[in-house]
C-alpha cells in the first residue's frame, strides 16, 4: 500500500546559515494521525510547507501518496488540504464566501460546493456566522473556519500546522474530536504541535524534531516511557536548600533529581508512593518545600530527556503562557533559563 | 462544533481539482476571476478605504489648480487643461501602491501560503489582484472626471478620444500594478510595502510632465523626465483628452530620432511603455510569487 507521506533525507536552508531541515526522514501510513513535535523554530512548519508544495526542498525527497512534491506539485495539491500556522482566512469575506473561494480554486462545481460549504459550516458550528465578514469572528471561530477551508475539497491527506495554538480549551477539544472523526473516515492527518499532550491524545506515531533533525520517533507511549510517567516538582525556599533537597532525594528513584534554581524535578514511575516517600525524607532532613506538584511530563521534559538540553527559551515561555489544558501544567520556573 | 454527531463525507470521493475538464486556460481564467471577485468584494466591505484613497487625488487637484497653478506658466492655454491629464496619471500611478499593499497583507495573513497549496493557476493570485485594481481605477477615473469638470476642466478633443485616454491610463495603471505586485511580495509587511513603493513613485510622478512643463526643469533633469514612462503617458493623455496645441507644447519623445508614422505619436510610445513594463514585470512578479519563502 502506498505510504501517505514519505520524507527522505530532506534538507532546507534559508539564507546561508539557517538550517531549517537538516536531513529529516519519516513516513506516515495512510489513514493514521501522525504527530510532528518540536519547539518553535524546530523545522515543523518548513516540513509542512515542503510537503504541501508551498516551498521547495534544497535536497531530498518528499512524496504525498506516492507523488513527488517537486516533480508533480499539481497532483499533490489536488490531494491535500492545508491549514497553516495562521488562520488564513480573508477578513473581508464572510465565512461562506471564504469556503466558496477555496472550493472554486479547487475547481469544484458550484452545486457541489454549495452543499459542501453548508455542511462544513454546520459541522464547525459556524452556520449562524456564515454570512458575517470574518473580521467579526473570534480567534477560535477563525481557526475553525480555516480548518473547514482545508477540508472543502475532501483532501486525502490533511496537514494541520499547530491547529490548536491559541485556542481555548473547549475549542481545542472540538478540533481534536474533528480530527479523530476525519481519520475514522480514512483521511490521513499530519499535525504539528508543541504539546505532548495533544500528540499523546491524537497521534498513533510521532517524530520529535529539534534544530531540523529528528531526535526521536515512535509512539507517544514509548516516548513517555523513556522518561518516567510523571514529574514531581518541588519548590524550595532558596537555591541552597534546593541542592540539599536534591541530594537527599537521590535514593528515591533510579533517575537523579534535577535542580533548576529553587526548583527540584524528579521523574518518577510511581507518583503517589514517591510523593509520600519524598516528603518523609525531606522532613527527616528538616526541609519544608514551599510548593509541590505532580504533573505529566511536558514536551520540555521530553526534550530534556532526549537531548540533555532544555528546549529553547521561547518554548518554555510559550508553554508557560498556555492556558494549561487540564490545569496540571502550572510550572515553577524560578531561576530557570 | 458538533464533529462527533455530524457525518463527515468520505474523503477523496469526488476527484475534485485533479481533473480540469475545461483545460488549463479555462481554469486559469476561472481562477483569476475567483480572485478578482474576492478582491472586489473586499473593496465593497471596506468602503472607507476606497473613499479615503479618493480624497488624496482630489486634494492634489485643489492644490495644483488653486495654490501652485497660478505660478506655473503654460502659455497658450489654461493650466487646468494641462493639469488634469497629469493628475489622472498621478492618481492611477499612486493607486498601484494598493496592489503592493494588498499582496503584502495576503502574505502576512497566510493567504498566499494557502493559495500556493491549492491546485490553482500560479498566475491567478496576482492577476486577480491587478484586475480588481483595474476595476478600482475605472471607478477612480470616473470620479476624477467629475472632479475635473467641477474645477473647470473641459474635454478639448471629443468624448471618444477622452475615453481612449482613459483606456490608455488604465493600461498604464495595470502594467504598474504588476510591477508593484513585486514590491508587495518582497516586503516583510504591508506598511513596509507602502514605504518601499514611494521612492519609486515619487521621482517618476514629480520629475515628469504631470504638473509642470518640462522646460522649467534644469537640463540634466529634462533628459530623464522627458523619456520616463509617466511623462510619456501624461503627454499622450493630454493629446487624447485636452488636445493641446501641437507641436510646441507637446513633448513627444524620440521625435528627433523618428519624425513620422506611429513613432511620432505620444500615444504609440505610451502604449509601448505600458506593454513593455507589463511584459517585463509580470513574469518577474509571478516568479517572485512562486519562489517567495516565508
Image (tube, coloured by chain):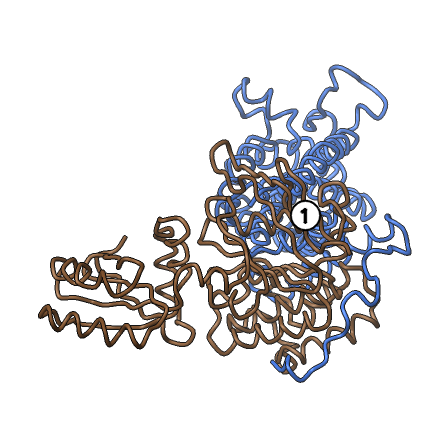
Chain colours: A brown, B blue
Q: Residue at 65% across / 65% down in the picture?
A: B44
Q: Residue at 74% across / 62% down in the picture?
A: A156
Q: Residue at 36% across / 74% down in the picture?
A: A328
Q: Is residue B104 left or right of residue A269?
A: right
Query: Is residue A92 depicted above or below B105 in this figure?
Result: below
Q: Is residue B212 left or right of residue B76?
A: left
Q: Residues within 10 Å of mark 1 (few under 14, many from 20)?
A: many
Instruction: Name the residue at the top extreme.
Output: B257
> Where residue A219 sits in the image (x, y, percent)?
55, 61
Q: Residue at 79% across / 28% down in the picture?
A: B265
| Chain under callout 1 | A
Element class at badge 1: loop
> Where residue B270 sits in the image (x, y, percent)?
74, 32
Q: Read off the residue under disc 1.
A: A53
Query: Is residue A294 depicted above or below A299 in this figure?
Result: below
> Where residue B284 sits in the image (x, y, percent)?
68, 35
Instruction: Name the residue at the left extreme.
Output: A286
Instruction: Name the residue at the bottom extreme.
Output: B5
> Where residue A249 sits in the image (x, y, percent)?
21, 64
Return the residue nearer the eye: B253 or A280: A280
Q: Is residue A324 left or right of residue B279?
A: left
Q: Is residue A253 left or right of residue A41?
A: left
| Residue B203 visible within the image | yes
Return the residue nearer the eye: A29 or A114: A29
| Residue B86 visible within the image | no
The quarter of the image holding the N terminus of chain B is: bottom right
Instruction: Name the residue at the right extreme.
Output: B22
Amino acid at each position: 500500500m502506498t505510504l501517505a507521506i514519505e520524507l527522505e533525507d530532506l534538507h532546507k536552508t534559508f539564507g546561508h546559515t539557517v538550517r531549517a531541515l537538516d536531513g529529516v526522514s519519516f513516513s506516515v501510513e495512510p489513514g493514521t494521525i501522525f504527530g510532528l513535535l518540536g519547539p518553535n523554530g524546530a523545522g515543523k512548519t518548513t516540513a509542512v510547507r515542503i510537503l504541501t508544495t508551498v516551498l521547495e526542498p534544497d535536497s531530498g525527497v518528499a512524496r504525498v501518496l506516492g507523488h513527488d512534491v517537486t516533480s508533480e506539485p499539481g497532483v499533490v495539491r489536488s490531494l491535500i488540504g492545508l491549514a497553516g500556522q495562521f488562520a488564513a482566512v480573508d477578513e473581508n469575506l464572510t465565512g461562506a464566501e471564504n469556503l466558496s473561494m477555496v472550493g472554486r480554486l479547487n475547481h469544484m462545481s458550484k452545486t457541489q460546493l454549495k452543499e459542501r460549504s453548508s455542511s462544513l459550516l454546520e459541522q464547525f458550528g459556524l452556520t449562524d456566522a456564515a454570512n458575517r465578514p470574518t473580521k467579526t469572528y473570534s480567534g477560535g471561530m477563525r481557526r475553525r473556519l480555516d480548518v473547514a477551508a482545508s477540508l472543502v475539497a475532501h483532501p486525502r491527506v490533511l496537514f494541520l500546522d499547530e491547529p490548536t495554538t491559541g485556542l481555548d480549551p473547549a475549542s481545542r477539544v472540538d478540533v481534536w474530536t474533528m480530527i479523530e472523526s476525519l481519520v475514522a473516515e480514512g483521511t490521513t492527518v499530519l499535525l504539528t504541535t508543541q504539546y505532548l499532550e495533544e500528540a499523546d491524545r491524537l497521534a498513533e506515531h510521532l517524530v520529535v524534531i529539534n534544530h531540523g533533525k529528528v531526535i526521536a520517533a515512535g509512539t507517544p507511549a514509548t516516548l513517555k516511557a523513556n522518561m518516567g510517567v510523571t514529574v514531581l516538582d518541588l519548590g524550595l525556599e532558596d537555591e541552597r536548600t534546593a541542592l540539599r533537597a536534591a541530594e537527599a532525594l537521590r535514593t528515591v528513584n533510579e533517575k537523579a533529581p534535577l535542580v533548576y534554581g529553587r526548583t527540584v524535578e524528579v521523574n518518577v514511575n510511581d507518583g503517589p508512593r514517591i510523593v509520600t516517600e519524598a516528603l518523609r525524607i525531606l522532613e527527616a532532613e528538616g526541609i519544608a518545600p514551599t510548593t509541590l506538584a505532580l504533573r505529566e511530563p511536558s514536551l520540555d521534559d521530553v526534550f530534556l530527556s532526549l537531548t540533555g538540553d532544555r528546549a529553547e527559551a521561547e518554548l518554555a515561555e510559550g508553554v508557560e503562557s498556555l492556558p494549561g489544558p487540564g490545569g496540571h501544567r502550572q510550572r515553577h520556573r524560578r531561576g530557570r533559563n | 462544533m458538533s464533529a462527533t454527531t455530524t457525518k463527515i463525507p468520505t474523503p477523496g470521493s469526488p476527484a475534485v481539482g485533479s481533473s480540469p475538464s475545461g483545460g488549463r486556460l479555462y481554469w486559469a481564467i476561472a481562477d483569476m476571476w475567483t480572485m478578482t471577485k474576492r478582491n472586489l468584494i473586499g473593496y465593497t466591505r471596506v468602503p472607507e478605504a476606497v473613499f479615503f484613497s479618493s480624497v488624496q487625488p482630489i486634494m492634489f487637484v485643489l492644490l495644483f489648480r488653486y495654490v501652485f497653478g497660478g505660478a506655473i506658466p503654460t502659455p497658450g492655454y489654461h493650466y487646468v487643461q494641462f493639469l488634469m491629464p497629469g493628475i489622472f496619471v498621478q492618481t492611477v500611478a499612486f493607486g498601484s501602491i494598493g496592489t503592493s499593499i494588498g499582496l503584502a497583507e495576503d502574505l502576512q495573513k497566510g493567504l498566499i501560503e494557502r493559495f500556493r497549496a491549492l491546485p490553482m493557476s500560479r498566475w491567478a493570485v496576482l492577476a486577480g489582484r491587478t484586475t480588481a485594481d483595474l476595476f478600482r481605477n475605472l471607478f477612480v477615473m470616473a470620479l476624477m472626471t467629475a472632479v475635473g469638470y467641477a474645477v473647470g476642466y473641459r474635454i478639448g478633443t471629443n468624448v471618444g478620444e477622452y475615453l481612449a485616454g482613459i483606456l490608455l491610463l488604465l493600461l498604464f495603471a495595470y502594467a504598474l500594478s504588476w510591477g508593484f505586485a513585486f514590491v508587495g511580495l518582497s516586503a516583510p509587511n504591508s506598511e513596509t510595502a507602502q514605504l518601499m513603493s514611494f521612492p519609486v513613485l515619487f521621482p517618476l510622478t514629480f520629475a515628469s510632465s504631470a504638473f509642470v512643463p518640462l522646460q522649467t526643469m534644469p537640463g540634466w533633469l529634462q533628459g530623464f523626465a522627458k523619456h520616463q514612462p509617466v511623462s510619456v503617458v501624461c503627454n499622450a493623455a493630454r493629446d487624447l483628452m485636452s488636445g493641446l496645441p501641437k507641436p510646441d507644447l507637446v513633448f513627444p519623445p524620440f521625435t528627433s530620432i523618428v519624425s513620422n508614422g506611429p513613432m511620432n505619436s505620444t500615444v504609440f510610445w505610451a502604449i509601448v511603455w505600458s506593454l513593455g513594463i507589463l511584459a517585463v514585470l509580470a513574469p518577474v512578479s509571478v516568479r517572485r510569487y512562486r519562489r517567495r519563502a516565508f
